[in-house]
């Protein structure tokens, strides 16, 4: 039994050592550094909510060198920030697919706090699910909830499997301070766009909505506010109108509207079916790009 426990312990330590070769400390806020991952050559990924300054950012590498970093782009919707670092001869993350991940899979959350070395938190994946949208409007390709302790400084660090491969990065900022793992497939997609454009384009209509239910069981969304110069306001939408469908697809919840407002929706007209004073009518609305002010 003792030998088995020792082998098990050594296997976990080996996984941490392998995964730790791509874990960095990111110095972009006061007091305590956050963690990040050397995702690609010259590219570090971390949690956006930990980036409190956009200049004079530094990164402590696994070999304890501290180097300057440049913010290439950030997205609060998915809580991903991309940094560029000019370093050579360092490892990039070995990525593990989430496809075989299941509830109960063992996993470790890693982090680095400056020159204090690697930190690890052991647990399991408590839940795995399909695509979901964050409360900030970001789209995730899958849901991963790790049952690990998120010690100070671990935000932005990786969740690794028992082989030391990276499943994604951990953050408590997207689900009321309960940790979730941003999956690698989402990170790759967002990173590509941030490196190309510096931000993630998301469509918006410029209206406030609230679900309503009709006596016949149908649902819709009543418009509570309209930005005068926003896309919907420019199309003639008024407070009190009820949205029934977008491009022929019924909408009964604000989430249904969000699915129409991905980046590719910007500038492409959508046909909205509405009620005004009990009378149905249709109008074409061209989504604009959501303003990026505020964070």
Image (cartoon, rainbow, N blue to C red):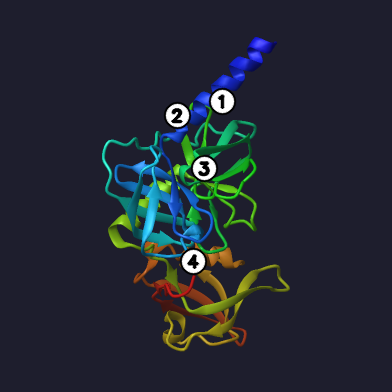
Few, some or many C-alpha atoms within 10 Å of disc 2 (few <14, some 14-19, many ≥20)?
some
Where is residue 85? Give x, y as percent. Answer: 31, 50
Q: Which quadrant, please, contains the N terminus?
A: top right
Which sits in the foreground, 47 or 129?
47
Mark 2 = which residue?
18
Mark 4 = which residue?
248
Asked which quadrant contains residue 277, the reply is bottom right
Q: Earlier in the sequence, mark 4 or mark 3?
A: 3
Against 138, is 97 above or below?
A: above
Asked which quadrant contains residue 39, the reply is top left
Where is residue 149? Give x, y as percent. Answer: 65, 43
Mark 1 vs mark 3, CA separation in Å: 15 Å
SS type, badge 4: loop
Mark 1 vs mark 4, CA separation in Å: 52 Å
Mark 3 = which residue?
111
Which mark is on residue 12?
A: 1
Q: Nearer the viewer, mark 1 or mark 4?
A: 1
Does residue 96 show up? no
* Circles 1, 2 touching at the beta carbon (< 8 Å): no
Where is residue 112? Give x, y as percent. Answer: 49, 43
How many numbered callouts?
4
Against 266, is 131 above or below?
A: above
Does residue 240 show up? yes
Q: Residue furthest right?
A: 215
Against 172, is 117 above or below?
A: above
Few, some or many C-alpha atoms within 10 Å of disc 3 (few <14, some 14-19, many ≥20)?
many
SS type, badge 3: strand
Mark 3 vs mark 2, CA separation in Å: 13 Å
Asked which quadrant contains residue 58, the reply is bottom left
SS type, badge 1: helix
């Amino acid at each position: 039994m003792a030998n088995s426990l020792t082998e098990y312990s050594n296997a976990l330590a080996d996984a941490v050592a392998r995964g730790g070769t791509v874990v960095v400390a990111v110095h972009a806020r006061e007091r305590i550094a956050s963690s990040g991952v050397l995702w690609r050559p010259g590219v570090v990924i971390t949690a956006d909510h930990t980036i409190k300054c956009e200049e004079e950012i530094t990164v402590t590498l696994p070999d304890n060198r501290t180097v300057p970093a440049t913010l290439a782009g950030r997205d609060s919707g998915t809580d991903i920030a991309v940094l560029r670092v000019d370093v050579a001869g360092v490892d990039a993350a070995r990525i593990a697919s989430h496809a075989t991940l299941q509830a109960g899979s063992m996993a470790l959350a890693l982090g680095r706090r400056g020159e204090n070395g690697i930190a690890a938190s052991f647990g399991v994946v408590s839940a795995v699910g399909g695509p979901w949208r964050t409360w900030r409007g970001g789209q995730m390709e899958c849901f991963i909830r790790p049952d690990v302790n998120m010690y100070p400084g671990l935000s932005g660090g990786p969740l690794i499997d028992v082989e030391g491969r990276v499943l994604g990065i951990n953050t408590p900022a997207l689900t009321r301070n309960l940790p979730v793992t941003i999956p690698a497939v989402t990170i790759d997609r967002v990173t590509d766009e941030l490196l190309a454009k510096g931000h993630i384009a998301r469509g918006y209509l410029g209206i406030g909505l609230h679900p309503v239910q009709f006596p016949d069981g149908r649902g819709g969304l009543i418009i509570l506010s309209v930005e005068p110069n926003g896309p919907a306001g420019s199309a003639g939408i008024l407070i009190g109108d009820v949205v029934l469908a977008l491009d022929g697809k019924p909408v009964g919840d604000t989430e249904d509207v969000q699915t129409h407002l991905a980046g590719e929706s910007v500038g492409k007209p959508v046909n909205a079916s509405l009620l005004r004073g009990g009378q149905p009518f249709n109008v074409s609305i061209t989504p604009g790009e959501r303003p990026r002010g505020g964070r």
